[in-house]
Image: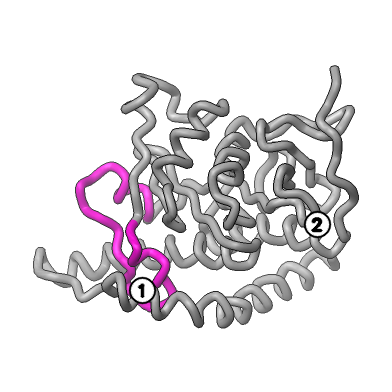
Amino acid sequence: MTHPASAGPVDPETIADLAAAARILAARGVVDAFGHVSMRHPDSPERYLMARAMAPALVTPDDIVEYDLDGETCEPDPPKGFLERFIHGEIYRARPDVGAVVHSHSPSVIPFGVTDVPMGAMFHNAAFLAKGVPVFDISQKFGDTDMLVCDCPKGVALAESLGDKDVALMRAHGSVACGPNLQVAVFRAVYTEVSARIQHWATALAGGGPIAALNQAEGALADVPNQGAGMRAWDLWRHEIREETGW
C-alpha cells in the first residue's frame, strides 16, 4: 500500500505542545477517554498532525501521527487512527484560516445541540461564541447513522455547517472548536465548555427571563484581545503538563 508523502519533520517542541494540548483538554474537563485535537502541519497546509487513537490524557509526543486531508496516514506502518479524523481533514480543506481543531463531547455543551436554545457568549472569554454557533445534524443528509463523522463526505457536511464560525455543535454527539493556531483552538474549546456551564446557571437564575449575553458586536471587539491574552491561559496549562511529564 502506498502512503501520501510526509511534509517533513516537525520541531519536537511543536509536537510536544500538541501532545500537551490533548492532556490540557482532559485536565480542563473538555475531553475524557474520547475526543481529539489536531494541528495543521507547520510546513504544509495539506497535512495535519494528531495523536493515534487513544485517551487524550495519555498522549505523549511519540503518539503523534501525520495525515493528509483525506485522513490517510503518511507513515508506512501507522498505529490505529481515530475513526473521526475526517472531521479535522475536511475542516482544514474548507477553512485555510484554521490551524487547529478540537473535537469533544463536552457535557455542558451537548444540551444546546439537542434543544432549540441557542448557545450564547456568557462572558468576554467566550466572545468567539457571539458570532453564532451552528448545529450540525448528521441525519439531515445521511439519515440514521451511528452519529460518527467516519468518512470524507460526512466531514464535508460538518465543515459546511461550521461555515465561517469558530464552534459548531454536533446534534446528540458533541462539538468542534477551531482556531488559527493550537493555543487559540484549545482556549476556545475550554471556554466553550465554561460558557455553556454559565449559561445553564444563568438560565436557572433568570427563570425564563432574558440573559444579557454578549451581542455580536461586543463579541467581535472582545475576541481580538482574547487571542493575545489567551496565551496567559496556555502558558499556565502548558506549565502544568510540563511539570507532570517533563516535556
Q: Nearer the viewer, mark 2 or mark 1?
A: 1
Three-letter amino acid code at the position of disc 2: Ile
First along the sequence among labels 2 and 1:
2
Q: Residue at x 34, y 49 (%)?
A: 134
Q: Is residue 123 left or right of residue 209?
A: right
10 Å neighbourhood of mark 1: few (<14), some, or many (≥20)? many
In percent of width and height, residue 148 lies at: 49, 30
Magenta residues span 109-132
Q: Which residue is mark 1?
A: 219
Q: Which is more toward the observer, 159 or 18?
A: 159
Q: Which residue is mark 2?
A: 15
Q: Which is more toward the observer, 240 or 18?
A: 18
Is residue 230 positioned above or below 137 on the image?
below
In percent of width and height, residue 120 lies at: 29, 64
Q: Is residue 5 left or right of residue 177?
A: right
Q: Which is more toward the observer, 241 or 46?
A: 46
Q: Is residue 71 left or right of residue 146?
A: right
Is residue 202 positioned above or below 163 on the image?
below
Query: In which quadrant of the rendered view does residue 231 lie?
Result: bottom right
10 Å neighbourhood of mark 2: few (<14), some, or many (≥20)? many
Q: Residue at x 90, y 51 (%)?
A: 9
**Residue 119 seen in the current view:** yes
Q: Residue at x 62, y 55 (%)?
A: 100
